[in-house]
Image (cartoon, rainbow, N blue to C red):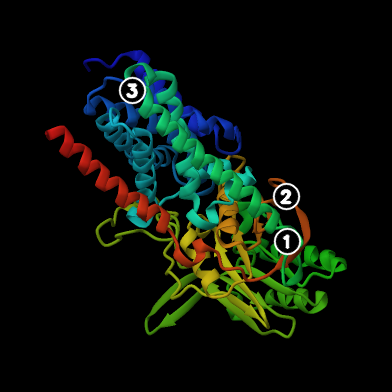
Amino acid sequence: MKGMNVRKVALAGLSGLMLTASFPSLTLDWIAWIACIPLLISLHDQPPLNAFKLGLFCGLCHYATLLYWIVVALSRYGDIPLIPSIAVLVLLVVYLALYPAFFALLFSMIRFFRLSSLLGAGIWISLEYARAHLLSGFPWCLLGYSQFLRLPLLQIADITGVYGISFIVILVNLALYRLLFRSLYERRVFLAAETAIIGIMVGVTLVYGYSSLRQKSEGSGDRALRAAIVQGNIDQSMKWDEDFQYQTVSIYHALSLESAAFRPHIILWPETAVPFFFQDSAHLCQFVYRAARVTGSIILFGSPAYEKRGDSISYYNRVYLLQGDGDYDYYDKVHLLPFGEYVPLKRFLPFVHRIVPAAGDFAPGRRLKPLTSGELRIGPLICYEAIFPELSREHALQGSQLLVNVTNDAWFGRTSAPYQHLSMAVLRCVETHQPMARAANTGVSAFILGNGKIVKQSGLFTREILRYELQLGHHETFYSHYGDIFAIIIIIGTIICLIWVQTIKRR
C-alpha cells in the first residue's frame, strides 16, 4: 500500500494496545489520555483508504486483547470447542474494529479543518453511540469507562452519561496531537483558540466534578439501609448439577445466617444463586424462606423461571425479592445476552445452535420495573444489563432508590472481564445518583455510592460476606430525565460539520 509503511502500522497497533492497557484489570487509566496519539500520527498524509486500514488494525489489536476472555468463557465454561470459540472472538473483534476504522477514515478527511479536534471528538462519540445501539448494542468498555476511578471526572456523567467522559478523553488526545505534531503546519492563532476552548471545557468539567462530590457526600440520603451481599463462589462446572443443588442453596443459607448479626434490611444473593425453579416451591426452596424468616431480612436472589402458554413454554432469567412473611416480587431480565441467552434472528441462523450449543433459549421480560417492599423501591439489573444506561435510567424514572446488579461472572474465569464489568456498573450510579449493591457469584461483588465511589469490594473466586449501610434517597438527575441528549446533540452537530467540510472541499 503506497505511503503506508511498517512504522505506521506499528503506531496504529500501539494505539490499540495502549487503549486496552487503560482498562481493567491493568487500569493504567492515564494511558487513555494519550492512547490515540500514535494512531493519529500514523494517519498523517494518508489517503482515506489507508487511514481506514490503519484504524482497522488499531481496532483489531485493541479488541483482541480486551476481549480475549470470550474464548475462556466459551471453551472452558461453555463446552464449545476451541476453534469455534476463537472464531466467535474473531468475528466480534472484526466487527468492533470497524468503528476505529471509520474514525480513522473520517478524521483523515477532516484533519486540515481548523477545529478538527472538536470535530474528531464528535466523530468518536457518534461511533460510540452507534456501537451501543446497533445490532442490540455492545457498549462494552467505551473510552469513558477507563476513568471509573477518577471521581471528579466521573460526575459529569449525571448530565452527559459516559459519552461526556469519552468526549473529554478523546478531545485531549486530539489536542495534544495537534499541539505536538501539527503545530508547524497550521496557523498558530487557530491552534491557540482551539486549545483554549478545550482547556476551558476540561476545567469546567473538573470544577463541576469537585463541586458535585461535595454535594454527594457519603452521609446524604433520606434513609439508611443496612445491606449484606453473600458471595457463594459456586464453581460454574457444578452450578447446574442436580446433585449439587442442595449444597449450593445450603451455602447461601449459611452465609445469610452468618450475616444476621449485622441485622441487614436486605441480603443479596447473585444471579441464578438458586439453580432450580423457585416458583415450583420444591423442598429446597425452604432454605430460602428460612433465611428470610430467621434473619428478618428481605432476600434478593436470582433463579430461572418459566411460564406455560398453551403448548409452549417460555423461560426467563429472573430475580426475586422475598420477604420474611413469604410474599415476593420478581423481575425478568429484559435485555438478554445475544448468543448466550438467545439466538438473534434464529429463523435465519438455524446453524448457530450447532456452532454454539450452549446458547440459551430465554424470553425477554415483558417490562422493566423496580422491585418493591413497603416504601423501598429497588432497580434490578441482571448481569449484562448493567452496561446499558437506559435500563438504570428507566428504573430511576420509576422511583427506584437503590440499584442492584446480580450477576454470575464465573463464566469469565480469572480474566480481566469481571473487573471490566464492575467498572461499567460504576457509571450507572453516577448517572442516576443512586447507590448500587452488586452481588456476583464468584466476584467481583461491591457496594458503590451514588457518586461512583466503590466503598467495599470482594475478591475474585472467594467466599465472603460484604456488609454496608447505604444512604438512600430518590434524586432525579439531568441524565435520568433527559437521557443521551448530549450524545444526540454531538451526533447532529458532527453530521452538519462533516457536510459543511465536504462542501468547502468541493468548492
Of residues 183 and 71, the one drawn nearer to the viewer in this rendering: 183
Position of residue 299 in the picture relative to residue 113 (left or right): right
Of tags 1 and 3, which is closer to the observer? 3
Q: Element under label 1?
A: strand
Q: Quadrant of residue 57?
A: top left
Secondary structure beneath label 2? loop
Is residue 178 positioned above or below 305 on the image? Answer: above
**Point 45% across, 23% down: residue:** 14
Relative to 374, residue 14 above or below: above
Quarter of the rendering containing residue 150: top right
Earlier residue among tags 2 and 1: 1
Q: CA distance from mark 1 to mark 3?
A: 58 Å
Residue furthest out toward the left: 507
According to the image, label 3 marks what residue?
Answer: 187
Of marks 1 and 3, which one's residue comes earlier in the chain?
3
Q: For the residue carrying disc 3, how many other residues have a C-alpha within 10 Å: few (<14), some (14-19), or many (20+)?
A: few
* Residue at 51% across, 57% down: 159
Q: Position of residue 115 (x, y in %)?
A: 34, 34
Q: Are marks 2 and 1 in contact (CB under 8 Å)?
A: yes
- The residue drawn where x is 77% and y is 57% is 466
Q: Tell me, yes or no, whether the two marked residues, 3 and 2, touch with CB atoms within 8 Å.
A: no
Q: Return the mark for residue 411.
A: none
> What amino acid is found at the position of numbered circle 3 in the picture?
Arg
Q: Percent from the top left, x then y, of residue 323?
A: 71, 80
Instruction: Give how far across and how far down residue 145 sits, in percent.
Output: 53, 45
Residue 475: x %, y % from top left: 61, 68
Q: Which residue is mark 1?
A: 229
Q: Earlier in the sequence, mark 3 or mark 2?
A: 3
Q: Tag 2: Cα neighbours inside 10 Å, few (<14), some, or many (≥20)?
A: many
Is residue 385 visible in the rendered image? The answer is yes
**Residue behind mark 2:** 458
